[in-house]
Image: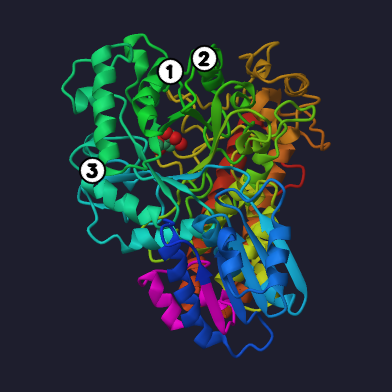
């Protein structure tokens, strides 16, 4: 077992643990040596050969594994029947470059794919599914898989030079960056290699390697640091991962010495064309750029009176000759808003900026849209922009790093949130869903799905050991948006921990509802924020109330919530098509959990649940905290079955979660009691 771990260069192997290895006698790979992933697939097989020594005592598993591209199947000793079965298993639409089939007949198992990348994904599938496959011993078994979304990207928010406020990784809760140190790419990329392997093992095929807030040092990735960027790209490529780079819109000024970055100026376009030329001579298969422009004080086309189609197309045209794509973020809003100004609603901003431009973007532009119109809240409406763009490629943006969901100190399994978003019906009347749009099933141009990473140089990658589940789940749900988040969680747990089935069941049971627990003890009914300004950790009910950031709750002595109706508020509800718009417009039909996102209502307003808003606030905050106490109890009952590092880590973080949840409960309850004067119907303790 320890032999296998050493392949992970000394880091926590997460879900790629020895416990999942197949007991095999023979394992072969047949793939064209020119295939870019041939060596990687072979190296993976070597891992298995090492593991087999440790595991071959198991009598009934698969004894022979063959990984083979379809075109070579006839040249292997697999036998006619099995070869026929493999071909029959290929779906009519084919396997594409990334799909694979698994066919088992008794002790023999074949993974077949169109190319090395599919073999790699099939291989990792087998590792994750080892236990269920072993359970079908002797039976015939056939499955076929193809990813739903063509691009499954992760964004690193890593800084090369430690930022005075944001540190080494912006919104990173797991230590420092392992890509960069002291303003440079690290010399030893072994941890990056381990990471690439982890990402590939859950089907991630694209990675942007630096923060979307591109500061001075990182701007130079385009120039001085190109050879180092190429080293990163080499490592990622081995694992089927395409490299993307975040660039500063103002690079022509910052690097090129121009006095403008006006997208309509020839010299600006020329500068970008030359810069991109240099980048592609270092990294011929770069995926392209990720850009945060005119967003939270970053430079952008607005400075020149140009719009975002001008800006995005400028970069797209420089990238086009090289086959590159620009992921252009839509997180564009006024972060210098006057809180007194009730006519501005941050939630409206992305739609208002981008919908009028639909149809003007080149086809190598992807608009990258956060799932909600505010900012990665545990509960907010799903962005209406994603459904509204008909003629532009769109990518859904999720956040794996737990900026607003407990910062990897709280257990918060995000799978159910993403499933809800992916399943969201953008019209309210039969789709398409967000998942349909991201996967191209909606018949619209797509850019896939993107999420912000949650890793750092902490020994266990994610700070909280159990937060590994979120990275795993993101990959699995990007591959298959219809997968059940509970099954994905179970798959993760099984692959990660060498504990008995009952313990696994208890662990996944306590993680599965953790998102809703978190929601209960934090901001109520979709109103959002109430977090400590800047750090975004822990409660501060009025922290952002009189700030320029546009995230307010408007609580007064009579009621709370943001009026986003057409009738009396910001008119945001009209950004949705019917019948969704009307459903949100009317408090009687608005879903309870989003009531305060859409409406300002009196504390006495009766929810569809039958409870008043004020009583709901008290109840959920008491319940949420009780649920954390329960988490602590349940974890303590199984903790001693886990390894010491996991035990210590989860114990310590749960203690902090409980402290913090109590703080949330008491601050929120006290605040609303003081505001409303309404006592808790059950007479529980509310501090005055
Ligand atoms: O959620 C906010 C974060 C910023 C981040 C920004 C963004 C990278 O607080 O730290 O900046 O979103 O998504 O651009």
Crowdedness of circle 3 by 10 Å Cα count: few (<14), some, many (20+)?
A: some
Residue 357 circle label: 2
Q: Which residue is mark 1?
A: 308
Is residue 6 in the magenta section? Answer: yes
The x, y position of residue 64, in whole percent, is: 61, 79
Asked whether the viewer can see residue 285, the reply is yes
Name the element at disc 3: helix
**Vertical placement of residue 423 versus 5, above or below:** above
The furthest residue to the top = 305
3D distance between C-alphas at marks 3 and 1? 27 Å
The furthest residue to the left = 257
Residue 294 circle label: none
Q: What's drawn in magenta, residue-wise?
A: 1-28
**Vertical placement of residue 237 versus 459, above or below:** above
Task: Please tell me whether mark 3 or mark 2 is closer to you in this view.
Answer: 3
Q: Quadrant of ligand 1?
A: top left
Q: Mark 1 and mark 2 in contact? Answer it, CB < 8 Å.
A: yes
Quadrant in which residue 473 is drawn: bottom right
Disc 2 residue lies near ligand 1 with CB under 8 A: no
The x, y position of residue 31, in whole percent, is: 49, 63
Name the element at disc 1: helix
The x, y position of residue 686, in whole percent, is: 63, 45
**Is residue 531 rendered to the left or right of residue 426?**
left
Q: Which residue is mark 3?
A: 226
Q: Nearer the viewer, residue 578 or 17?
A: 17
């Amino acid at each position: 077992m320890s032999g296998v771990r050493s392949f992970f260069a000394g880091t926590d192997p997460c879900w790629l643990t020895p416990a999942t290895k197949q007991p095999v006698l023979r394992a072969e790979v047949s793939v064209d040596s020119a295939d870019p992933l041939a060596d990687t697939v072979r190296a993976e097989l070597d891992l298995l050969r090492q593991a087999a020594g440790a595991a071959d005592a198991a009598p009934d598993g698969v004894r022979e594994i063959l990984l083979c591209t379809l075109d070579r199947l006839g040249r292997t000793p697999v036998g006619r029947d099995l070869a026929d079965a493999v071909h029959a298993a290929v779906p009519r639409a084919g396997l594409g470059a990334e799909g694979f089939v698994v066919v088992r007949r008794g002790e023999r198992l074949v993974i077949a794919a169109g190319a090395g990348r599919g073999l790699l994904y099939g291989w990792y599938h087998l590792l994750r599914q080892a236990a269920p496959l072993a359970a079908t011993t002797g039976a015939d078994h056939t499955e076929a898989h193809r990813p739903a979304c063509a691009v499954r990207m992760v964004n690193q928010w890593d800084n090369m030079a430690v930022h005075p406020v944001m540190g080494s990784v912006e919104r990173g809760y797991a230590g420092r960056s392992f890509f960069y140190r002291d303003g440079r790419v690290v010399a030893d990329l072994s941890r990056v290699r381990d990471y690439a392997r982890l990402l590939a093992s859950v089907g991630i095929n694209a990675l942007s390697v630096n923060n979307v807030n591109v500061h001075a040092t990182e701007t130079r990735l385009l120039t001085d640091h190109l050879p180092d960027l190429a080293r990163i790209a080499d490592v990622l490529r081995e694992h089927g991962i395409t490299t993307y780079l975040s660039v500063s819109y103002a690079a022509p000024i910052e690097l090129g010495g121009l006095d403008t970055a006006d997208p309509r100026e020839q010299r600006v376009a020329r500068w970008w064309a030359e810069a991109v030329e240099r980048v592609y001579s270092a990294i011929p298969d770069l995926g392209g750029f990720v850009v945060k422009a005119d967003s939270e004080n970053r430079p952008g086309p607005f400075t020149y009176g140009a719009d975002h189609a001008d800006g995005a197309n400028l970069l797209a045209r420089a990238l086009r000759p090289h086959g590159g794509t620009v992921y252009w973020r839509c997180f564009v809003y006024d972060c210098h808003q006057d809180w007194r100004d009730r006519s501005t609603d941050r939630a409206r901003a992305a739609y208002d900026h981008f919908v009028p431009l639909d149809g003007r973007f080149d086809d190598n532009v992807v608009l990258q849209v956060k799932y909600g119109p505010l900012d990665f809240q545990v509960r907010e409406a799903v962005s209406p922009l994603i459904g509204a763009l008909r003629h532009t490629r769109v990518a859904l943006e999720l956040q794996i790093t737990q900026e607003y969901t407990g910062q990897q100190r709280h257990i918060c399994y995000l799978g159910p949130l993403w499933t809800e978003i992916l399943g969201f019906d953008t019209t309210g009347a039969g789709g398409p869903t967000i998942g349909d749009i991201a996967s191209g099933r909606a018949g619209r141009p797509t850019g896939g799905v993107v999420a912000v990473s949650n890793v750092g140089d902490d020994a266990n990658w994610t700070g909280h050991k159990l937060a590994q589940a979120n990275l795993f789940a993101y990959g699995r749900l990007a591959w298959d948006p219809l997968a059940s988040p509970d099954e994905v969680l179970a798959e993760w747990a099984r692959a990660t921990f060498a504990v008995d089935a009952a313990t696994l069941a208890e662990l996944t049971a306590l993680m599965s509802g953790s998102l809703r627990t978190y929601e209960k003890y934090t901001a109520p009914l979709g109103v959002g924020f109430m977090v400590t300004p800047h750090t975004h950790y822990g409660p501060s009910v009025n922290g952002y109330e009189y700030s320029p950031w546009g995230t307010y709750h408007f609580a007064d002595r009579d009621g709370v919530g943001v009026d986003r109706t057409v009738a009396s508020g910001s008119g945001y509800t009209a950004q949705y098509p019917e019948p969704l718009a009307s459903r949100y417009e009317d408090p009687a039909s608005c879903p309870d959990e989003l009531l305060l996102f859409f409406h300002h209502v009196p504390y006495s307003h009766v929810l569809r649940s039958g409870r008043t808003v004020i009583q709901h606030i008290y109840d959920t905050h008491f319940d949420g905290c009780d649920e954390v106490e329960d988490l602590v109890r349940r974890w303590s009952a199984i903790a001693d079955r886990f390894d010491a590092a996991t035990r210590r880590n989860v114990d310590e973080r749960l203690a902090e979660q409980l402290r913090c949840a109590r703080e949330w409960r008491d601050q929120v309850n006290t605040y609303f009691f003081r505001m409303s004067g309404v006592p808790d119907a059950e007479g529980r303790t509310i501090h005055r």
